[in-house]
Amino acid sequence: MQAFGRIKRIVTASADAIILYFDGTNLDDANNACHHMLAAIDSKKGSNSWAWLRECVPSYDSLLIVFDMTLIDSHGVYRALSNLSTEDIYQQSDSSQAKGNESSAVIDIPVWYGAPNASDLSVVSKKTSLSIEEVIELHTSTTYKVYAVGFSPGFAYMGDIPEALKCARLGTPRKRVPKGAVAIADRQTAVYPSESPGGWNLLGLTAFDMLIHKKEQSEARLKAGDEVRFVSVTEQEYRAGLQVER
Amino acid sequence: MRIEVLSKGLFSLIIDNGRVGRQRDGFCESGPMDSNAYDWANFLAFNLDGTPCIEAIGEMRLRVDEDCIIAVTGRNPSLDIDGNAKTTYQSQKVPAGATITFGSTSLGCKAYLAVGGNWQVPKAVGSACTVVREQLGGLDNKGSVLKEGDCIEVLANTRNQDSAKMRTLPQQHIDDYGFLESIRVIPGYQFSSFSTVAMRTFETSSYTVSSAIDRMGFRLTGEPVTADIENMRSEAIHLGAIQVPGDGQPIVMMRDRQTLGGYPKLGCVSPCDISRLAQAMPGEKVNFVFQHEEEARADWLLMTSRRRRLQGEIL
């Protein structure tokens, strides 16, 4: 299948799924192209001619499209995508950007750096040859973008962290990382939405809940494209935050 | 009606069709491991498609406090009601107070119990499916597996009970489990980054189902297959994707797989063969054969229409 627009490659994933890979001058650009396409597809959801659409799963620079094989084949999916005019895609991106601008100033995530059960600060300090203060300073000095949400519910992959803070994963993953642990690995940073195993370097804890809990429809609090900043808080402020989040 | 768990078996879950459309928030797809058996169980118990069911590994015992209609399916399933062996893949009337014992006679395989009626179980993110890792679904909606003493509320479908013509799936139409026939694989994802030699190796070797098999993925062992990729960005993992980490031992990603992952994938197990693979036992040997996506779709359409025709005949 011939690629078009910002799509670099279209590849079969299974009998009922194709995956699109996007191009850009850098990752940020490709990630934006992916989300413009996703928004354009989402706007068609519910229309009869798109009844075959089962699910779209975006990531850094790719978008998986799952379809109902009884209603369409991959060629039909390709036609539907290529018929999305550039206008569709741009309009969507404009309106989603406008929407984004209203609601989102940068989202602040308060972090108690060095919380005893979630701190690899000394390890990170050794790996990066930075002092602990410098590590915290660098981590809080950058505004991050949410590139993708996945792996587990609400887990947001954010980047890029400053080059100086780049840090390999732990040699042996932890069996238990506490809920709310703020972590870094390579050029990425994230918050563990719930207790789980994990191999990232931990910097501290946040009371910020990564899931919005609703009766039947919990959802991820951060969405791909959101902008995030980490703010250093004291243990007291962290504990007060836990009360509020509950 | 209350269904009380007397003996929980090895690993028993409340499941349904799973969560559709929420993988972008990180919620796994979930759903029945053997969707063919699950669909038949509901059909035979006079339920609508997608009604919750119990997926059980090991032998499970339950008691019902009202008359009801049930059906048990799966790989080599067994069923007895108050000590009397009953036919599986068939609607069975169960009197109030009776004890139902069911399971698969093959260790580690899944059996499905459908109970006709409206299941009063909590839903999370659009589904009642239990995902232990995500603390979702189950009776407490915290992802707990079923345990002794648990009670499931089902509003029994009384309308059918006297007049209903019991349904049977004839023996010759029950799925063939086991691996005399190869598992079909659609080449996809990073397929072109695997060498021709690697692909030949994959298609001509037998792989052994390891004991590391769960709802997330099935690890296989055998001739290593590696891709010529150093680093790739995490991307969405579809059902049946065959992931090959650095050691070259394939992992088939199943219903509760994580939504994103960064290992190279050589394609996906055909949707027609996922249920069969999901019922594999540790130690069984599996062969793979590549199949073009269009052929796989044709097979799937045939399989679906055959099932619809059969259901029409049974009705």
Image (spheres, rainbow, N blue to C red):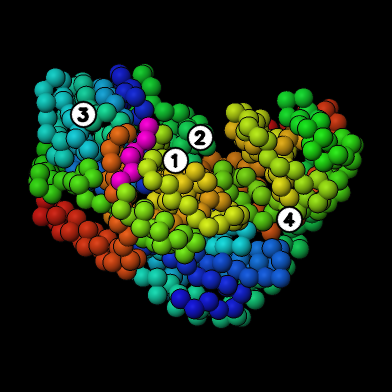
Q: Residue at x 17, y 59 (%)?
A: B306
Above-or-below relation of B265 to B43: below
Q: Distance between the Cα atoms at labels 3 and 1?
A: 23 Å
Q: Residue at x 47, y 54 (%)?
A: B265
Marks 4 and 1: in contact by CB < 8 Å?
no
Looking at the image, is mark 1 or mark 4 nearer the viewer? 1
Magenta span covers which residues? B206-211
The main secondary structure of the magenta stretch is strand
Q: Amino acid at mark 3?
A: Thr
Q: Which residue is mark 2?
A: B133
Q: Is residue B189 left or right of residue A70?
A: right
Residue at mark 2: chain: B
Looking at the image, is mark 2 or mark 3 nearer the viewer? 3
Other-residue count near label 1 (Cα within 10 Å), few / some / many at <14 / 14–19 / ≥20? some
SS under mark 2: loop
Q: Is B82 part of what is drawn in magenta?
A: no
Answer with mark 1 or mark 2, whichever residue precedes in sequence: 2
Marks 3 and 2: in contact by CB < 8 Å?
no
